[in-house]
Image (cartoon, helix red, strand yellow):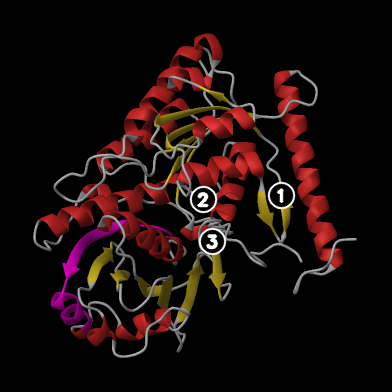
Amino acid sequence: MPRSLPGLSRRDFLGASSALMLGHQAFAAEVSEKKKTPFARPRVAAINSIYRLRSHAYHIAGRFIHGYTRNGFHHQPPFDLVRMWNHQQPKDDLGHRVCKTHNIELTETIAEALGANGGLDVDAVLLIIEHGDYPVNDRGQILYPRYEFFEQIVDVFQKAGRSVPVFVDKHLSYDHKLAAKMVATANEMKFGLMAGSSLPVTWRRPEIEPPVGTKFEEAVVSFGFDRGTVEIYLFHALEVLQCMLERRAGGETGVKSVQFLEGDSVWKAGDEGRWSWRLLHAALSRCPSTNTGPIRENVLQPQAVLVEYRDGTRGAVLNLIEQTSEFAIGAKVTGQTEPVSSCFYLPAPPGARFFDPLTFNIEKFFATGSSPYPVERTLLTSTMTDLAMQSLKGGSKVITDPALGVTYSAPVDSGFFRGPYVDAG
């Protein structure tokens, strides 16, 4: 008999396990009916930039191979990862070894990964272009070829006369115009497209899920990362902001402007009320890593992106490297005295278990062909990231652009993981 977890009774565990098993059986039956072959498991291809320790492909594709922890117990995705293509093979490459060990075909081209003899014989595609050796432009953006590889996937779809769901890791593209083209292509060809990072679905402490229609007025996200380029973690922070503010009354109506600030101009903007010190302190209060001492004294080079939404809602994300190493949010709701706040918890590498909830949501997407949360969210955060980097390059100029006018409705359930994030003892 499995041992129970704190907060999870044996009855709850057995019920959840039964529900998950029934869901997998139903999905397998659906796939079998489509393929007219008994006991067929859906087949997945992984298109990666690089497969090495701690790369995103290692964590996401690796979970399709090895499984991961769900509610404290091992969960094995009901899919077969059948082919892999890796753009780069550095000295610490693990792609050849993992493919050989697990009987995965390592291909020479993207087209070969999607199907033998020029066809399409997989049921879903992972596009994981994060990490690797790629150039950086003059705005500090890594030129990951997500769009170019997406186009090669689409080319296979067009030749095959059919398509399958595609997951794109992190932002759609460093270029918001290319990101918009990707979404438009998926809509035109009518295939499911999901994108984004782990932040919106990782564990939250406390476990808050404001209902859709919450009257948010303002939100501030705190984070602290200096590894790599600014863009890398800025995107994550904007995802935290967006997955909360998209739940506001009236739905997502789009963004009016973004502005990147650095140094003393960040503190000045707070003093002028352009972002809220109170909400910042509410966010930091949830973070175990929060440093002692005054923020102004601790943080040597603060960075911020100020976001003004079309409906008047305000948002800000602040990179405070010396003050915190976690992502957290503080938000003001009309009629509530105290801010809503939570830390978006990221279990540390090498396991990096925040990829567990992301992978589980990818599974749901592959099972249904419909993303658990709108791809328009990632289109908006991709666009905000790109234009914020333009603002940085342009000396903190306020950037307005019609491309920021992305509208959509938030899902009732954001899909973030509740409960334990460690294995049952």
The residue that mark 2 highlights is: 373
Number of the front mark, 1 or 2: 1
Number of the front mark, 1 or 3: 1
* In the displayed structure image, the side of residue 239 where residue 57 appears, left or right: right
Number of the front mark, 3 or 2: 3
Q: Which residues are magenta?
A: 251-270
Is residue 253 in the magenta section?
yes
The residue that mark 3 highlights is: 202
Which SS class for mark 1?
strand
Q: Residue furthest left?
A: 395
Which SS class for mark 3?
loop
Quick one: label 3, few (<14), some, or many (20+) residues within 10 Å? Answer: many
- Tell me which numbered mark, 1 or 2, is placed earlier along the sequence: 1
Vertical side of 17 occupied by 45: above or below: above
Residue 188 numbered mark, or none: none
Where residue 187 appears, as percent x and y from the top left, is 43, 33
- Tell me which numbered mark, 1 or 3, is placed earlier along the sequence: 1
The residue that mark 1 highlights is: 75
* In the displayed structure image, the side of residue 93 where residue 261 appears, left or right: left
Distance from label 1 to label 3 (Cα)?
A: 17 Å
